[in-house]
Image (cartoon, rainbow, N blue to C red):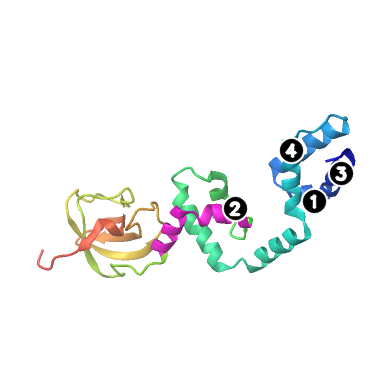
Amino acid sequence: MTTEEIKSLLDSLADFIPQASQWEQGFFESVKSQFDKNHPLSVKQIETIQKIAGKFTPEAIREREAWYESFGELQKENLRVCAEYYKGSGYFRDLVERILTEPDYIPTPALYKKFAENKFALKVLEAYRAEPKFPVGSLATLRAKRSSGYLAENGYAPWSDVNVMVLSTNEPIVSAARGCKRYRCIMVGSTVTLYCEERDLKKMKRGK
């Protein structure tokens, strides 16, 4: 690119840069300062500026506006379910906190895709919406060997097969393993409540 073309690119991007990410704003300011001091820009710097500018073409702006207008309750629920899943892992830490504290937050299409449409997130969402094998009010047996999704809410559940009644079938999912749909249950004949995954449960044998 010629010097005039680079100047035109920087000038045209200046009006939109406040809408860019914090990193992109910092990069732009650094490159512009370098250019204003008559220091040549590298090919990589020019390519990065062009990439940032590509986000603010009329077509890109129209697509982004359409995304925000179409963002509905389903997408919000997807964000919440995935945020609960990531919360204990440390992944997407800042984004998780924002989603869980700002109900009206809408990420960019690219960020949404990365957060809620990767292979692990899709497994979590599928499990969350799957028909439960053990409906609310049904009886089941909690296996002695339990997943990482098991947690006694109060009291103590013996590390042996124990019978439980299902209280809820849509608890926050904490793993993407097969059978990860999460339940809240209460031990039969006890006040002990607990969280477990569907794979932790099996049909209760009558007469036990």
**Magenta segment, which residues?**
109-128
Q: Which label lies toward us, 3 or 2?
A: 3
Inspect the image, locate mark 2, and give the three-letter code of the amino acid beneath it: Leu
Left or right: where 178 falls relative to 142: right
99 to 26, vertically: above or below: below
Disc 4 target residue: 27
Q: Say if mark 4 contacts mark 1, CB within 8 Å.
A: no
Assess whether residue 96 is covered by the magenta stretch.
Answer: no
Q: Earlier in the sequence, mark 3 or mark 2?
A: 3
Q: Earlier in the sequence, mark 4 or mark 2?
A: 4
Q: Position of residue 112 (x, y in %)?
A: 57, 56
Q: In which quadrant will I find the C terminus? A: bottom left
User: Which of 39/166 is in front?
Assistant: 39
148 to 26, vertically: above or below: below
Disc 3 target residue: 5
Disc 1 target residue: 16
State how far apart marks 4 and 2 are (Cα): 20 Å
178 to 136, vertically: above or below: above
Mark 2, Cα crowd under 10 Å, few <14 / some 14-19 / many 20+, is few
Residue placed furthest toward the right? 4
Inspect the image, locate mark 3, and give the three-letter code of the amino acid beneath it: Glu
Q: Earlier in the sequence, mark 1 or mark 3?
A: 3
State how far apart marks 1 and 3 are (Cα): 18 Å
Q: Residue at x 53, y 46 (%)?
A: 92
Disc 2 target residue: 111
State how far apart marks 1 and 2 are (Cα): 19 Å
